[in-house]
Image (spheres, helix red, strand yellow):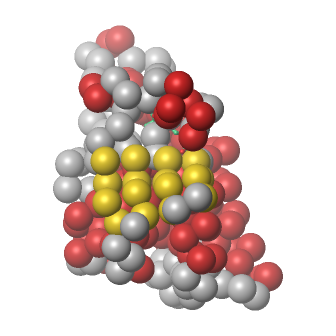
Amino acid sequence: MIELLGRATSGNVQKVIFLLEELGLPYERKDFGRQFQNTTTPEYAAMNPMQKVPTLVDGDVVVWQSNTILRYLANKTKSGLYPADPAPRSQVERWMDWLLAELNPAYLAGFRDAKKAEGERAPDTATNLGNELKLLEGALAKTPFVASAQFSLADVALGPIVKRCIGFPLGLPAFPKTQAWLGELQKRPSFQKATATG
Ligand SMILES: N[C@@H](CCC(=O)N[C@@H](CS)C(=O)NCC(=O)O)C(=O)O
């Protein structure tokens, strides 16, 4: 059976739970990371040299990097969530790449600053995060899901992280299209399960 190693409070683990649940694949999740203090062992480092979560173990196959895990699972199951045709596939991939390269640094700064008092926050945290989320809002003004009219791997990758971003008490502008999209995701039991820990 597939094993997912990673605490359920990690946004990157939540993406993978979201997909495993969507695909209906049997899996067992084991708590690794942060308070569990078990990613620094030689055994874990041999599987995932970053010593971070998530790691997916599928028999002899070990996969790390959350977006790579998503693509692995979608390819393995030939899921339509990751279109085979190059043009629609590129639309999905660009948002997955945008998440890692563009949104993630702003998200991590927001995550840190959301726990601080207002006067202790970096002045550009909310601006940077707001600017990134504006791009997503623009896309969602054109199509109901991130990459197209169809729910895809891009929604799976972005959903848990964007849900957190929107909830940060940083005085971000309103993003009505993004809120509506999150409302649609929230109807899915898979998303509810993935993000149950917040
Ligand atoms: N780019 C990596 C990032 C992995 C990452 O930073 N994971 C965080 C949790 S979201 C982590 O392992 N933090 C330390 C820990 O939980 O022990 C991925 O997408 O998998």
Q: Which residue: 54% across, 70% down?
A: 73
- Which quadrant of the view contains residue 96? bottom right
Q: Which residue: 61% across, 67% down?
A: 71
Residue most toward the left?
196
- Pick the front one: 16 or 146: 16
Residue most toward the top?
120
Q: How many marks?
A: 0
- Measured along the vertical axis of the image, is residue 65 above or below residue 58? above
- Measured along the vertical axis of the image, is residue 52 above or below residue 99? above
Image x and y of residue 108, in percent: 47, 33
- Pick the front one: 141 or 196: 196
Specify the quadrant that holds the N terminus.
Answer: bottom left
- Pick the front one: 27 or 108: 27
- Measured along the vertical axis of the image, is residue 49 above or below residue 86? above
Q: Which residue: 37% across, 32% down?
A: 33
54 relative to 65 in the view: left or right:
left
Image x and y of residue 101, in percent: 67, 44
Residue most toward the right?
86
The reply to whether residue 157 is in sight is no
Image x and y of residue 166, in percent: 34, 49
Image x and y of residue 99, in percent: 58, 52
- Pick the front one: 47 or 183: 47
The reply to whether residue 16 is in sight is yes
Q: Which residue: 64% across, 72% down?
A: 92
